[in-house]
Image (spheres, helix red, strand yellow):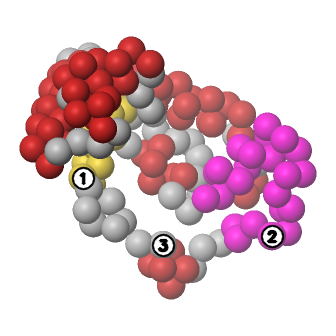
Amino acid sequence: MLNKEQLADLAEQFPTLKENGSDTYEEFNSLFEQLDSEKHAETSRWKKRIGSVTGTYQVQGIAVHGADEIVHTIRVEEEVAFSNWINSSLSQDTDLKPHLPVNPEGGDLYQKVSDGLIICKLINLAAPETIDERGINKKISIPTQNSKI
């Protein structure tokens, strides 16, 4: 959404918009190219800032609809902290014996939470009885696990 200053700048750059309430094709095309260029410049600056963060690694993939590439930047210290917190908070849960402990390094966290059991347990830890324990699928079969791929 454009603010008032941005609209005023556009009105100065494209006088027919202000006078006629519409733009010529050439003005519209020029505006589009300018905005597209600004967008790409900002995206490049943002990517450089993200890429320069220390203590991180990136995981890349393709969006489900296939049109966009997705890049996740993961902070190692957060991965370690979450893994340690899960290990200490859920260590007594007998349903999670096959999942725990979570190795704080090497992406083990993402493998262990992939079947949803740890996530369900964390939700119930934060807000008891949010998820009915009887409805949690605690033993994932191979066909069920493969259907998530």
Q: Which x, y percent locates residue 113?
A: 54, 52
Q: Earlier in the sequence, mark 2 or mark 3?
A: 2
Residue contact at pointers 2 and 3, CB within 8 angstroms: no
Q: Residues within 10 Å of mark 1 (few under 14, many from 20)?
A: few
Between tags 1 and 3, which lies in front? 1
Q: Amino acid at mark 1?
A: Glu
Label 2 – label 3 distance at C-alpha? 18 Å
Q: Is residue 17 left or right of residue 148?
A: left
Q: Which x, y percent locates residue 22?
A: 29, 43
Between 71 and 23, the one lying in front of the other is 23
Label 1 – label 3 distance at C-alpha? 20 Å
- Quadrant location of residue 24? top left
Between 139 and 27, the one lying in front of the other is 27
Q: Amino acid at mark 3?
A: Lys
Label 2 – label 1 distance at C-alpha? 35 Å
Q: Residues within 10 Å of mark 3 (few under 14, many from 20)?
A: few
| Residue bearing mark 2 | 135
Q: Is residue 41 magenta?
A: no
| Residue bearing mark 3 | 148
Residue drawn 45% across the image and 53% down it? 111
**Could you tell me which secondary element the residue under label 2 belongs to?**
helix
Residues in magenta, as a range? 116-138
| Residue bearing mark 1 | 69
Relative height, residue 45 to residue 132 (above, below):
above
